[in-house]
Structures are given as C-alpha cells and as structure tokens.
Amino acid sequence: MGVWGVLGATIGIISCFAALAFGLFFFAYAAKYYASILIALATLGRGKREEGEASGEGEDRRDAPLVSIHLPFYNEANVARRIITACLNQDYPNIEILVADDSRDDTVRIIKERGWRSKPPIVKFLHRRDRSGFKGGALTEALRYMDPRAEFVAVFDADFIPPRETISRLINHFRESDRRSLGTDFPELQPRTGAGKPVAAVQGYQLHYLNKSENWVTRAVRAEFSGSYMVERVAAERYGALKMVSGSVFMLRADVLRKLKWGTSITEDWELTLRLYREGYRVAYTPLIQAPAEIPTTIRALAKQRMRWAEGHTYAVRRHFRGVLTSTKLTLAEKLEFVYLAPYYLQGLALLVGTLCWLLAEANHTCPWFWRPAFGWALLLSNLLAAPLMCLAGLWLEGDLRADYQGVFGLVALTYLLAPYQGYAALRGLLESEEGTWIRTMKTGSITDRFLRMRLRSLLSWLSLGGRLGRLVPGAPRLPRLPIPARGIFGAVCLLLLVLPLAAAFAVI
C-alpha cells in the first residue's frame, strides 16, 4: 500500500470515529425528542371539547393583584401601536403598562401620542439615551419606575399580540400552581418531581404564527416552535425538568424579580432562569396561554437571531455550570435537563459535521472492524427524523391546520443552513471572555394569518383545566382524548427510530 493508500485509510478510520462520536452526541438529543413525543402522547385530556377558559371579567379590582406589564422597545415603529393597544385591551381589571424604550427611530413619536394617556389603565413611558445592558438594561430601568404595589410582572416583546384574556390566564395559572405546590388535592396534575418548589414564573406559548404563510422560512419556523412548545416543553413540565423563561409571554412574581433583578446578558431570560433555579424556584409552563408573534422572514435575519441565542446561552451555561450542578436546591431531573441544554446549540453542528465525516468514511471504504453501513444509515436516519417528527406531532396536537405541515420539510433544510452559524456562535460563547453585542431582529409588522388563539386538538390532562379541576374554574375547557390509532402510529414510529440504531449496533456485535 502506497503513501496515498495509507493516508486514505487513516482518513477513513479517523472519519469513522469522528462520525460515530458526533452521531452519538446528536442521538442523545434525538432520543430525548422521541421520548418527549411519547410522553406528550401518553397522557391526553378527556371529555368533550369546549371553548373558553377562566378570565378576569367580572373580577373585583380590590381582589385582583396589581400586574405591571413591561414592554421593552428598540426601534419598533412598525409594531409599537399594535402591542400597546393589545395591552390596553386586556380584560384584567388591575394593570399598569410600562414601556421601556431605547429607540432612535419614529417609535419615540408613536409612544408619545396623547391618545395612550387618555385611556385607562395607567401607561408609563421611559426613554433611555443609551442602550447599556440591552434588553436586560431596559427591563431593569422599568423595575425602578414600577408601582411598588405590583405583585406580578408580565413581559411581552414588541412583535407579539397578547389576546385580551392573557393576563387573567397567567394570574389563574399562578393560583393553580400555588394550590398544587401547597397540597395534593389533584395529584394527577403534579409534575413528577419538584412539585413542592415555589413557582417564580409562568411561561406561555410563543405562538409564531402572524406571518407564517409569508415564505418557506416562516413556515419552517412555525413548525419548529410547535414542536418545542407543544411537545418538548410539555414533556419537560410533566417530569419536572428545568424550563426556561423565554423572553416573552411570561409572568414573574414581582418580589422575586426585585430580589434577583435582571442581568445584562444578551440572553437575559436564560440567565435569569438559571439564577431562579439556583435560588430554589421553578418555572411553570402551559400551552393554554398563547400569544401570536411575528417570524423572521429571511435566513440572514434568522441566523443573526439564532447566533445571539447560541452565544448568550452558552456563555451563561459556562458561568453557571458549576453552581447549578453543585446546588442543593435543584432536583436531579432539573440538573439532568440543564446538562441536556448546556450544549444545545452545538447539536446542529454535530449533525452537520457528523454527516460529512460519515460520507467521507464511506468514500474511503476503510473503516474499523465494528463499522457497518447499516449502522451508519440507521443512526443518520434516526437523527435526521427526530426534530421533524417532533414538529409533526406538535402541529397535529394543535388541530387540523394541514397547511402548516409543509413547514416540516423546510425545517430539515433550515437545520442544515443554520447549523454552522449556531455552532460558531456557541463556540464563541464557550471561549470568549466577554459576551458579544445585541443584534436586533427587525420587525416588519406583516400579518398573513390574523389569528389570536390556537384551537388545540388535545392537551395533557395534568395541564388542562378540565376534569375535577374544571369544577374550580367556571368555563374551563374539557378536551378530547387523542384517538388510539393516531397515538399508536406516532408512538410506533418513535419507538422504531429510537431502537433502530441500537438494533443495528447489536447486529454488528
């Protein structure tokens, strides 16, 4: 064998081992996706579907805790009126609206319009001359001017349109979470672990929907968020894992926020999440509370957004890694979820590089004794289909919106296109001494699908307000059980893809 032959054989063997390492790394995430689908499908709501849920209409203002709604703005001229109007129209009787503005464009003129001040509730406008601390800095400034009587803080990004009952539902979910934490009246509604920990925040569903029909990118992102919010986060709530405060459509206890305050990270929400859990609190999630939002329309805009997420996420993980894992205030499930989330934005890069290494190994036809093409194909197939199948399950659970299914095909392409950007940004967050700057995602105000609330096909019984809990809340929805054939199909496919690489590996041995 000549020099070139030896070199080719060496490259082939190295590529095989690299492909296996990257493939197994990504398979850990794929297995989590399949398990989340099975968990989400395993415990579904019962009873007849009904519309509506408890709201704040008719609630006595004297019994309603004050909620301070914080709206961080930065050059939001296209959407400023829309979000302020949506907050003014909330049915909850005791709120204030606080706009924390860093804008340098026409947004300043819009928020100074006299009409806002002539309407109840109270609207406060803060304008900063600098952007120190970015979004976290603006929210910190809002805390300074918040009414001292406020018991809860709700945060919405400028491109969201919260339906009029959103604040009422967030408050109601806090009340139910407190009941579950203090007693065992409804054990079927309890997460598996960590149920006794105080709830510091309630996160709702960021329904990326408003312009979903604009192009293939928006359709793909719509499908991606459906998988995340209808399957992955639902499963995490079920087994008591760590859950993120995700930047918008959430409510925090004001006293907890006054104590911990906002940070200045470019992912201030994730950084606050880690500090909340280190202090012994937990975050509750429900897909019943939804607010539609705008979706980035181009690969360029989406890549910039995801690079900020990847860099800030990984930087915060590095800062809090030891503290989270050594804390006595986190449960084992919460720590395991943190370990799963720590290299989250590297998984796309692992899929991309692992696939390239596997193709290179196949081209050289020189592999270790245990390598068989069947194992490589099985691992690749299982990894490649995990996220699309989770998104299909999420879309299916939301209802009969067949037009959304095509977004799953675009998601596969989007995964490969964004992988190098996210991987590079995650490596920066892992290695850099200081975080990078905030890169704003442009909002256009475009609406192709006017829609404020998703009709869910079915929900988990422990998350819905049906059944026995429904007697406590007038108008609570009772939701249908998912048909057994459909559950069986999803479950069988997940199990097949989960065990396929394992079966191929044992066949080699």
Image (cartoon, helix red, strand yellow):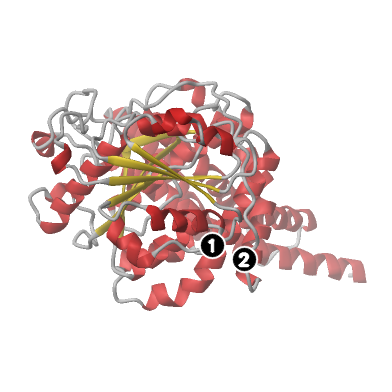
* Label 2: few (<14), some (14–19) or many (≥20) C-alpha neighbours in 10 Å: many
Along the line of sight, the residue nearer the viewer: 16 or 167: 167
Q: Position of residue 191 (x, y in %)?
A: 23, 54
Q: Amino acid at mark 2?
A: Glu
Q: CA distance from mark 1 to mark 2?
A: 7 Å
159 versus 501 height, above or below: above
Along the line of sight, the residue nearer the viewer: 360 or 163: 163
Q: Position of residue 93 (x, y in %)?
A: 23, 35
The residue singled out by tag 2 in the image is 435
Instruction: State the residue at coordinates (44%, 49%).
Output: 33
Secondary structure beneath label 2? loop
Q: Earlier in the sequence, mark 1 or mark 2?
A: 1
The residue singled out by tag 1 in the image is 265
Instruction: State the residue at coordinates (53%, 62%).
Output: 265
Give the side of residue 305 with respect to residue 66, left or right: right
Q: Position of residue 240 (x, y in %)?
A: 29, 57
Residue 84 appears in which quarter of the rendering? top left
Give the side of residue 359 with respect to residue 138, left or right: right
192 versus 168 height, above or below: below
Along the line of sight, the residue nearer the viewer: 378 or 319: 319
Residue 508 appears in which quarter of the rendering? bottom right
User: Can residue 446 be seen by looking at this rendering?
Assistant: yes
Secondary structure beneath label 1? loop
- The reply to whether callout 1 and callout 2 are in contact (CB within 8 Å) is yes
Instruction: State the residue at coordinates (34%, 44%).
Output: 38
